[in-house]
Image: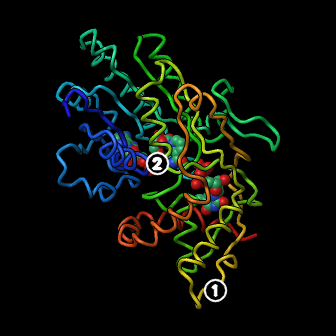
């Protein structure tokens, strides 16, 4: 594979980014320059299988370091930048929003500046081919009522958490670089992902690991908030489709048509654990469910209308929720070493900080 088919991925040591890098190397096979500054959510173990693969070039650094990014772009001449790097956890954004503004807003701005300078230096043919793909979220659209139509690409932005506001802000900057400077950008707004390498502060991996160990399963509020779940490899295939055939300047919503109430997700995990890892000492995992104080400003429902990417690009998710969640539970059971490594001192501090104040209801 030619060097000119290389891509620069940011945040490729995180949950979705590492799944993307692994599947890119498998499906496409061209070189990946992976820029990640290894925050608590970045984990080089996710990419261990590529340790001896010369197509994966890991660079430890910040997206806001314009000198570093410009050097990387000039050296490797990637045909695209796929931008995952972000602070991504809503609860952390409520406790400490600063890092979200720094990375999601300023970091994206800085990366756009580097990309713009690089794009300007390319030949006309290279410019035509170049893409800046910005990975965003459905949370920018705000919250839906039970009967509201799903989010489409024209739904007005109404972010409710500092995380969602920082992502909305980055989406607007990306859009502006297309209209003002002609940078060929693409934006994807995806629903909640789940699958291997998911950091266990988010709902699904937290419930799997707590359930496995017989710990409480903390469900916020009444447990009836709805998320539209997508298996992470389906998100990766959607990004590849948009990169390949998406129209510059356009946004594409990506979702799994798998809306579930949180309580249903949690009971499904409980039943899978009882089946796959039965324990006489723990008994039925459903008994561990504990309703706790709600998240402030908790969005009630997300739902994605993914007709545009399906119709324009022929993308379809391969996994249904039932098959994807089974695979995910099986992955966590089979990868206990990975789990032990991510649960560092910093992880325990977060769990203590987030749940100590949430009294059981
Ligand atoms: P994650 O938190 O697991 O990973 C983020 C990665 O970015 C980490 O490896 C981290 O080290 C890196 N990073 C953070 N700040 C950086 C910086 N300044 N410079 C370089 N690297 C930096 O996040 P994720 O769940 O994999 O999400 C990836 C992207 O997808 C994010 O942009 C997120 O907003 C978006 N997204 C996530 C979901 C989801 O359900 N997880 C859904 C839709 C969209
Ligand atoms: P999360 O995985 O944090 O994703 P997001 O907030 O980006 O949707 O949470 C998913 C849902 O699960 C959300 O409605 C909040 C809820 N939740 C709990 O009920 N308990 C928990 O311990 C966590 C982390 C989340």
Residue 144, x across and y down, in percent: 75, 40
Q: Residue furthest bottom?
A: 280
Query: Quick check: marks 1 and 2 in contact, CB under 8 Å?
Result: no
Which residue is identified by label 1? 283
User: So how many labels did they put on this image?
Assistant: 2
Q: For residue 134, which quarter of the picture?
A: top left
Which mark, residue 233?
2
Residue at 53% of width from left, 54% of height from top? 194
Residue 98 appears in the figure: no
Up-down relation of residue 119 to residue 255 (above or below)? above
Local packing at callout 1 (Cα closer than 10 Å; few below 14, some 14-19, many 20+) is: few
Question: Could you tell me which secondary element the residue under label 2 belongs to?
Answer: helix
Q: Is residue 216 left or right of residue 126?
A: right
Question: Could you tell me which secondary element the residue under label 1 belongs to?
Answer: loop
Per the model, the C-alpha gap separating discs 1 and 2 is 33 Å
Residue at 53% of width from left, 31% of height from top? 314
Q: For residue 203, which quarter of the picture?
A: bottom right
Q: Quick one: 17 or 272, which is closer to the camera? A: 272
């Amino acid at each position: 594979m030619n060097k000119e088919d290389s891509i620069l991925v940011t945040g490729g040591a995180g949950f979705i980014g590492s799944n993307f890098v692994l599947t890119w190397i498998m499906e496409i096979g061209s070189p990946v320059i992976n820029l990640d500054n290894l925050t608590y959510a970045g984990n080089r173990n996710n990419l261990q299988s590529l340790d001896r693969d010369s197509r994966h070039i890991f660079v430890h650094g910040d997206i806001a370091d314009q000198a570093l990014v410009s050097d990387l772009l000039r050296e490797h001449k990637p045909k695209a930048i796929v931008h995952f790097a972000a602070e991504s956890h809503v609860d952390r954004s409520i406790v400490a929003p600063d890092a979200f503004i720094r990375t999601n807003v300023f970091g994206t701005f800085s990366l756009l500046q580097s990309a713009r300078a690089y794009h300007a230096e390319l030949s006309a043919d290279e410019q035509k081919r170049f893409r800046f793909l910005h990975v965003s979220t459905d949370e920018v659209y705000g919250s839906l009522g039970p009967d509201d139509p799903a989010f489409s690409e024209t739904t007005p932005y109404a972010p409710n958490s500092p995380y969602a506001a920082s992502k909305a802000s980055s989406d607007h900057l990306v859009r502006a670089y297309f209209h003002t400077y002609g940078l060929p950008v693409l934006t994807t707004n995806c629903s909640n992902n789940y699958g291997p390498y998911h950091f266990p502060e988010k709902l699904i991996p937290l419930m799997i690991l707590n359930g496995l160990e017989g710990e409480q399963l903390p469900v916020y509020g009444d447990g009836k908030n709805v998320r539209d779940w997508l298996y992470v490899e389906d998100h990766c295939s959607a990004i590849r489709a948009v990169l390949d055939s998406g129209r510059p300047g356009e946004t594409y919503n990506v979702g799994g048509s798998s809306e579930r109430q949180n309580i249903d997700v949690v009971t499904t995990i409980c039943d899978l654990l009882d089946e796959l890892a039965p324990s006489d000492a723990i008994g039925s995992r459903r008994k561990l469910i504990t309703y706790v104080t709600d998240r402030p400003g908790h969005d009630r429902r997300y739902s994605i209308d993914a007709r545009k990417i399906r119709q324009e690009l022929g993308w379809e998710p391969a996994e249904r929720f039932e098959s994807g969640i089974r695979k995910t539970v099986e992955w966590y059971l089979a990868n206990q070493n990975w789990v032990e490594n991510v649960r560092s001192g910093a992880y325990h501090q977060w769990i203590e900080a987030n749940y100590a104040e949430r009294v059981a209801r």
